[in-house]
Amino acid sequence: MGYPHQPHQRETTVLSRYFGDAEARTLAGWKNRGGYQALEKALAMAPADIVNVVKESGLRGRGGAGFPTGMKWSFMKPGDGKPHYLCCNADESEPGTFKDRELMRWTPHALVEGCAIGAYAIGAETAYIYIRGEFTEPLHWMNEAVKEAYAAGIIGRNAMGTGKRIDVHVHKGAGAYICGEETALMNSLEGRRGNPRIKPPFPAVSGVFGMPTTINNVETLIAAIPILMNGADWYRKMSLSNPKSTGTKLYSVCGNIERPGTYEVVMGFPFRDFLYDVCGGPLPGRKFKAVIPGGVSVPIQSMEEAEATLMDYEGFVAQGSMLGSGGVILIDDAQSMVAVIARIARFFAHESCAQCTQCREGTAWTTKILERIRDGQGTTEDLDTLLDIAEQMTGKTICVLSDSCATPVVSGIKKFGREFEALIQGRTYVSVMEAVA
Amino acid sequence: MPEKKMITLTIEGRQVSVPEGTTILEAAKQVGVLIPHYCYHPGLPVAGVCRMCLVDVEKAPKLAPSCATTVADGQVVHVYNDKSLEARKGVLEMLLINHPLDCPICDQSGECELQDYTYQEGREDSRYREPKRFNPAEDFGGDVVYVPNRCILCTRCVRFMDDVAQDPVLNVSERGDRAVIGKFDGRDLTHPWAANVVDLCPVGALLSKDFLNKARAWELDRTASVCPNCTQGCNVMMETRENQVVRIRPRPNEYVNAYFMCDWGRLNYRWMNEKNRVERPMIRQAGGLSPVSWERAISAAAASLKGRRVFVAASPMLSNEALFLLTQLMASGSFRVTEGDEAPLPGIEDLALRRERAANVHGAEALGFTKTRDLLGGLAQGDVLVVAGEDLAGIDPAALSKASEIVVLGSVLPSGVTNPAVVLPIANFAEEEGTVTNLRGRVQRFTQARQAPGETRPSWLVLGDLLGAMGKQSSFFLPSDVFARLASSHKAFAGLSYDTLGFKGLPLATAEATGPKAPLAMGLA
Amino acid sequence: MPPAPETMGGPESPDYASHDHAAHAPYEPVFVAGSASRRELDELIPRYPQKMAALLPALWIVQRERGWVSNEGMAEVAALLELTPAYVKGVVTFYTMYHQHPVGKYFIQVCTTSPCGICGAEDVVKAFVRHTNTGELGVTSADGRFTVIEVECLGACGFATPVMINEEFIESVTPAKVPNILAALK
């Protein structure tokens, strides 16, 4: 649903169906809408069977990496004698992304249900929902939903009367982008600085508290509900493109666009139609100049690339970017790409955890150079230096925050180099915009 | 313990087989390739953050941190190909963008890993044109001062305090390029082993207040030795400038002290440079003590001792060699030892600043000296008293009156001794060579770090000459000769020699344990 | 062109400002036996297999009760969770939402990250600074009522510009709305 707008007829509202429907927030309201039936069904199944259904559905991680969910769940070895944990990544820290916020504030019970299903499927008795501290409203509704679910015996020592224990706890973050990285989230949950960990060991071997752990995005876990209710085939068929990308996907749309909001379309939806039709196109009198389709970490697309994109994991890659977190940021012709990219770099410099040299120093250095260019103090060597720093920041650190900072710099210089060059040549912003118009 | 599976791989064209679980970085050391690194230290948990040790492993999608990547069969590792060199060059440039170019005033200069690797593999210039970040220096307490501008955030210090000292008083504070090593107001680096963070720091960010501005690294002479300040026997380097001991730092030995030494041992060296010394042999003549030649002094001492019952008050700082020779002339001997609180380093098994604050308590006992609080209790009426290395501080002078005669071997005149027959000036611990035996019975060599003043001679040489003059045996040419005699006459020392001891020592035949029960995984620091 | 943010994230930002703590009243412990906060913490701890995991929640309680997390607050939490104050400080300084110094009665956070930045967030920041009489970012107004800071992504990019005032989240703020928003604060 194109919340805060009425759903567009070309949307397929599976997960967003109840956005804006305040009654869906309560346990009674959720049950009236068919809530917790999937959990009941799941608890009557063998965990391996749940994993298989999810595998067959083709569901892939909705947090950014797109790893097949069923396969991830299957890494959790049953009967290893260790406590297993499910972590729900509700840190949603990627700028441009706010779909999980809507899921949690409108359908908090869906996440409780999704967590309970996921926990049961991977042999975990405890699920932690790690929600970023800034999400005061989602935190409120999630806490309420968890409380209601405990009170109703849906979760707890004897989940839905099955004798199975499933605890779900909400854990509040405290302001750190990097805690959206799975191992940083685990460190943060343990009461540490949110530093990403070296992998291996992978979470399925040694995750939170040193135990086998699966970590899933909010949207991924909630998607398990309709998959269990309607079957893998039903989900797999929701694709307009290829069998590797199935189901529906939520997109957060923001920036310079007529109708920003959260939209749900099936995989393979034409990006051009999405931007101009579903989301209403550019602001009056403006033209789109660029799109960042998956949160600020992914490469910037030119409009030519964007308009040729089919919206799925492979489709965005084919057009020079990535699906990422589904945070679609529109940049119109009133913006300076240099300023936009400088601001993105500043974000990463602020958020670098400080562990790896290239990230700690490179994000700040990149920011300083970009801001200098933006302010008309750039030199001709700066672009080469930026690309060189970006190369040093790519593929060399524990996590990909460093790469994420380098990505818009590289794609920005490659696709919008004229704006950089014009600023370096000492022109004013206005004349730059005229030059590139 | 079952044998670990051996893994064979190729590093820089050299094949090496190492036990499963070994890291590429440690495996490379075995074929003589030191992969540049900062955050890695073999005595600390792996952090993998500096990214300096990235190497190119064939078929791997990305460069691998060699400190955190374990070996696999058939791996082909390139440390010096373009890809790896470019990555290291990049790290070095990044580390330097906010690092002040203050090598000329930095204590670390000359022994700085940032300087070394930049010189070897870094860029010739910096492309950084922006202002450098600045944070003021901070007193961390204890012997440590922190200069954040030079810090490369390798976190060795934090990991040492967390995991080895197990006193987490340091942290990484803040994020991004604002990050610094921090501590909590009012909680200082007062742990008795805290100064190790200065050695661990690969750059000039953590400095010793004691060593501050004292010397440039290239002015120092370094001597392998053993810390004489307690019975643990930590292996050390004694560092001298212009014949003055100016710093003592730990030398790795997995059987004794891993990579570390305590602050007490480290900072307790000024006595080695003592200026107020007896520098010439003297004998008693009309009008008091008069300087004489060594020949006359030795003859006089031999004459005093010959045919008399001899009681020795020895110092437990003396070497096995000196103590052994003393046993050849004495009827009985005692020693006393200063005591303090034991202070363990929790992260390393059986490593502590020991209660007994002298190097050779165990050796003295093994050779037949009696440990006592009443140093002269065994002195019988009419004995000749030999005071060897003991300053007799706090001893009631009346106790000396039982002695029929007093012969002094020492670096100072003992307190209360007013009119000895002979004074034979001997070298102190830093000025001679020998062995000491630690509390677990490990015999370890120490070597001469500074020249003894005046006509002072090594204790073993003086005692050998004295025994020769008494007709007891011929003189010795080298301390190893004395040790060989000792080894042949004492069962516990049987089979040991300077050659077999090397510079890590060996346990006495009678010793049960030798420090850490399982040697740590040791590599070059 | 949107004006550049001037003071995000650097050592000059309020997140990193050092303040003289001595001027404040003596610290009153938050988790005294029998208190509601102590009961809350005691209920939180068993949710995790390790006591340390209650650190972030415990710091949140301190901030809720005292308005900020002082050194004394860190030391109190450290003792309860068997940690050292230095460790706790390392954690506190990692997370930008813990105040390491007192802030105004209304702590106003305006998102200026790229998606909001291109929708005019800078002007919203300016409006807040002007109408609160704080003069500059990170500074508390003379009457102690307001502190305004820029903040990185609040996660509501489709509702540019989102603003958080204490725990309250306000969407789609424009400069024109700022006076009314402030007037509604008691």
Image (cartoon, rainbow, N blue to C red):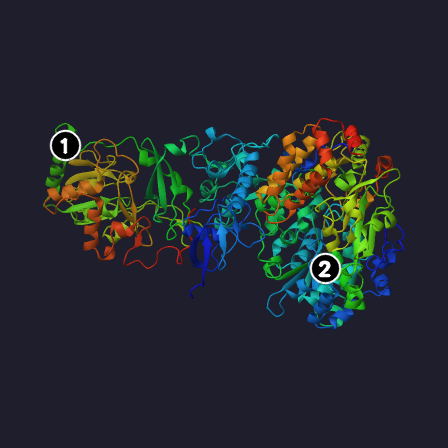
* Discs 2 and 1 lie in a common subunit: no
* Residue B204, horizontal then vertical, whole percent: 48, 36
Chain on which label 1 sits: B
Give above or below for A141 relative to C152: below
Instruction: Tell me how far mark 2 sits from mark 1, CA to CA.
Output: 93 Å
Q: Quadrant of residue A235?
A: bottom right
- Residue B403 visible: yes
Q: Is residue A85 left or right of residue B486?
A: right
What amino acid does circle 1 point to? Ser
- Can you give x and y, in whole percent of width and height, for residue B161 in the image? 50, 46
Q: Residue at x 38, y 45 (%)?
A: B251
Image x and y of residue B350, in percent: 40, 54
Estimate the x, y position of residue B498 in percent, counting from the top left. 25, 49
* Dot 2 amino acid type: Arg
Q: In the picture provided, is A348 more to the left or to the right than B401?
A: right
Q: Nearer the viewer, mark 2 or mark 1?
A: 2
Q: Return the residue at label 1.
A: B293
Q: Can you identify the residue that label 2 sits on?
A: A60
